C-alpha cells in the first residue's frame, strides 16, 4: 500500500509496526514459552502465537506497545522486556504488506497470565521451545526457532 506525501506529492509505501512478547520460564532442563491459540481475529486463526502482540500506536514506543499488549491480552504488568530482534517482513496477501516487527522476551512480570480477550483467543498454554505446537504463525516460528537455538540475530527477514 502506498500513500501520497502531502508536501511532495510523491508516493511512499506504508510500514506497519508491531510488538510481540514471548513470555519464557524455566522448568527443569527446558525453557517454555507461553502461546495463545488465535481464534476470531481474521488473521492466522487456529495458529499458535505470542501470548501478547499488537500494533504500535501513534506516539508509542515498541516497548510501550509490548507492555500495553501484555496487560490488555494476558493481564500482566511490570513486564521486564529483553529485546530479541526486529523483523522486516512482507506479506503479499495483506492490504498493507510491509511490516516491521519488534520481538521481546520476558522472564519477569507481575500477575498470572490469563486470557482476557476471549473473542480472539481460544487457549493459552506453556510449551517447551523444543516441542512447539503445530501450527505456529510462520514469521513468529522463525524467531522461536532462533530463540531455541540460542542465536537470535538482531535483524531478521520474512517473506522476501
Image (cartoon, rainbow, N blue to C red):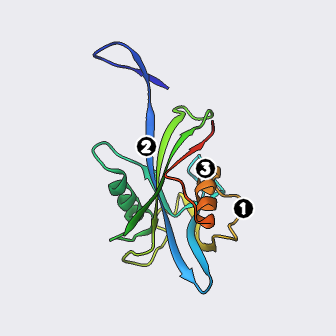
Res 17 label: 2
Few, some or many residues within 10 Å of mark 1 (<14, 14–19, 20+): few
Residue closest to the eye, 37 or 138? 138
Position of residue 8 relative to residue 129, above or below, is above
Q: Label 3: few (<14), some or many (≥20) within 10 Å?
A: some
Which comes before the other along the chain, label 1 or label 3? 1
Query: What is the C-alpha distance between the residues marked 1 and 3?
Result: 13 Å
> Residue at the spot x=60%, y=37% of the render?
91
Q: Residue at x 36, y 61 (%)?
A: 67
Q: Which residue is mark 3?
A: 139
- Whole-Å distance between the Cαs marked 2 and 1? 26 Å
Which quadrant of the figure has residue 158?
Answer: top right
**102 vs 109: above or below:** above
Q: Quadrant of the C terminus?
A: top right
Q: What separation in Å lies between label 2 and label 3 (alpha carbons)? A: 14 Å
Q: How many marks?
A: 3
Amino acid at each position: 500500500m502506498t500513500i501520497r506525501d502531502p508536501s511532495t506529492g510523491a508516493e511512499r509505501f506504508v510500514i506497519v509496526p508491531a510488538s510481540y512478547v514471548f513470555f519464557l520460564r524455566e522448568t527443569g532442563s527446558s525453557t517454555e514459552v507461553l502461546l495463545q491459540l488465535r481464534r476470531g481475529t481474521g488473521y492466522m486463526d487456529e495458529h499458535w502465537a505470542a501470548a501478547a502482540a499488537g500494533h504500535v500506536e501513534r506516539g508509542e514506543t515498541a516497548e510501550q506497545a509490548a507492555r500495553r499488549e501484555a496487560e490488555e491480552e494476558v493481564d500482566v504488568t511490570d513486564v521486564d522486556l529483553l529485546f530479541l530482534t526486529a523483523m522486516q517482513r512482507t506479506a503479499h496477501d495483506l492490504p498493507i504488506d510491509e511490516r516491521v516487527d519488534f520481538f521481546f522476551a520476558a522472564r519477569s512480570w507481575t500477575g498470572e497470565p490469563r486470557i482476557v480477550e476471549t473473542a480472539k483467543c481460544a487457549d493459552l498454554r506453556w510449551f517447551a521451545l523444543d516441542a512447539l505446537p503445530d501450527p505456529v504463525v510462520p514469521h513468529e516460528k522463525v524467531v522461536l526457532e532462533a530463540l531455541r537455538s540460542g542465536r537470535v540475530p538482531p535483524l531478521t527477514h520474512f517473506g522476501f
